[in-house]
Image: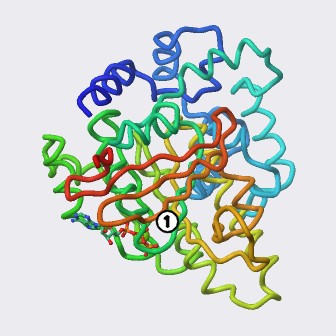
Amino acid sequence: MAKVETKEKKITSKPIKEIPPESAINKKSTKSKKTTQSLEKPFLETIAGIGPTTRKRLEEAGYGSKEAIALATRSQLTEISGIAEKTAALLIREARARFDLGLKKGTDYEVAAKTRVKLTTGSEAFNELLGGGLETGSVTEIAGENGCGKTQIAHQLAVNCVKYFDQDVIWIDSEGTFRFNRIVQMAQALEIDPEVVLSRITVGRAYNSEHQMALTEEALTMVPNVGLIVVDSLMSHFRSEFAGRGTLAERQQLIGRHLSFISKQTEILNCVGLVTNQVSARPDGIFFGDPNRPVGGNVVGHTVTTRLMIRKGKDIKRTATLTKSPELPDGKIEFSITTEGVRDYKK
Ligand SMILES: Nc1ncnc2c1ncn2[C@@H]1O[C@H](COP(=O)(O)OP(=O)(O)OP(=O)(O)O)[C@@H](O)[C@H]1O
Ligand SMILES: [Mg+2]
């Protein structure tokens, strides 16, 4: 245990999260970039023809920065009241020009990859499965049956984010299962002040899918120093609200929008995205492999970068199976969930 913690501390001791991965692709050093940034006017103030009202509307919709606008589509901006097609096009063009979203060399990706770091899970075996932990700059999905430990893992990652990243956490809670006392227990186990951890977690209790999407966008514009964004759980509201077959297309479209917003933000902020997901029995029935699969279909499957399936064993024992990763082989490990949190499983 101690070994992993020291390693994570060492990795995260450099000022990694101040800038998005793309900006690391610029030839400038982090230091000069920061200095320039502090002297620069906010992006929207530099665009002629964008008045204070329009600026406010864009900011409220989550498009206050050049990074967010650079990654937006024209239709997303024109959905905001008062933003005409021409203005949207101008904003996107300007933002992309200043954000260096053009073509890059393969070697540039090496630089970008170096800005991404891993957030420890609390278990060495689990970290090993993930090549060190949950990676910043993309979304990881944790799926499994009820009671398998998805929310527990999210609590552990929130505490770890404060302890090892020294950054804030956004927690979108759609099921009312965020527990301050679990944070206290896990923080105490890591010898970090629980009050400090709690004060750095912003919780948004989402009461329906629309509320969930709005809270996510609001939190991401409000919280300045995000290291982890948790959506626990991603699909519960969408599943109950869009029950009939006729509403499936609309549901999938909304989920796609919600998830791709989160995914873009994790890239922009270089933070960890974690969504938990429910499972359902495969309708076709299978003879080998897992009889369950995460809900949300291809939209969720394609949008998340890394997929994990958790299964409950006897007592504290759990298994985690990596089923999708752009750079790691599939695999399966054992770990445990104890009062102290996520730990290695000791037989
Ligand atoms: N204080 C604790 N000490 C040890 N284990 C605990 C503690 N609290 C919860 N657990 C374990 O975590 C399990 C609940 O896990 P969790 O709430 O994360 O499930 P989940 O996968 O999020 O389920 P759901 O799909 O219903 O949201 C409990 O059944 C128990 O095994
Ligand atoms: Mg849960």
Above or below, comparing residue 69 to residue 298 in the picture: above
Q: How crowded is mark 1: few (under 14 residues within 10 Å), some or many (20 or more)?
A: many
Between 314 and 224, the residue placed more toward the observer is 314
* Mark 1 residue element: helix
Residue 14 in the image: state x and y as whole percent: 38, 18
**Quadrant of the rendered structure where residue 277 is?**
bottom right
Say how the picture is coloured.
rainbow
Between 76 and 322, the residue placed more toward the observer is 322
**Quadrant of the rendered structure where residue 61 is?**
bottom right
Q: Which residue is drawn at 78% across and 85% down?
A: 247
Quarter in which the N terminus is drawn? top left
Q: Which residue is drawn at 17% across and 56% down?
A: 184
Q: Which residue is drawn at 29% across and 41% down?
A: 162
Between 29 and 132, the residue placed more toward the observer is 132
Q: How many marks?
A: 1
**Quadrant of the rendered structure where residue 101 is?**
top right
Q: In which quarter of the image is ligand 1?
A: bottom left
> In the image, is 156 to the left or to the right of 237?
left
Residue 326 in the image: state x and y as whole percent: 69, 37
| Residue wearing tag 1 | 215
Residue 44 in the image: state x and y as whole percent: 63, 39
Q: Residue at x 62, y 46 (%)?
A: 306
Between 286 and 254, the residue placed more toward the observer is 286
> In the image, is 145 to the left or to the right of 316?
right
Above or below, comparing residue 202 to residue 272 in the picture: below
At label 1, the amino acid type is Leu
Above or below, comparing residue 218 to residue 346 in the picture: below
Residue 129 in the image: state x and y as whole percent: 51, 38
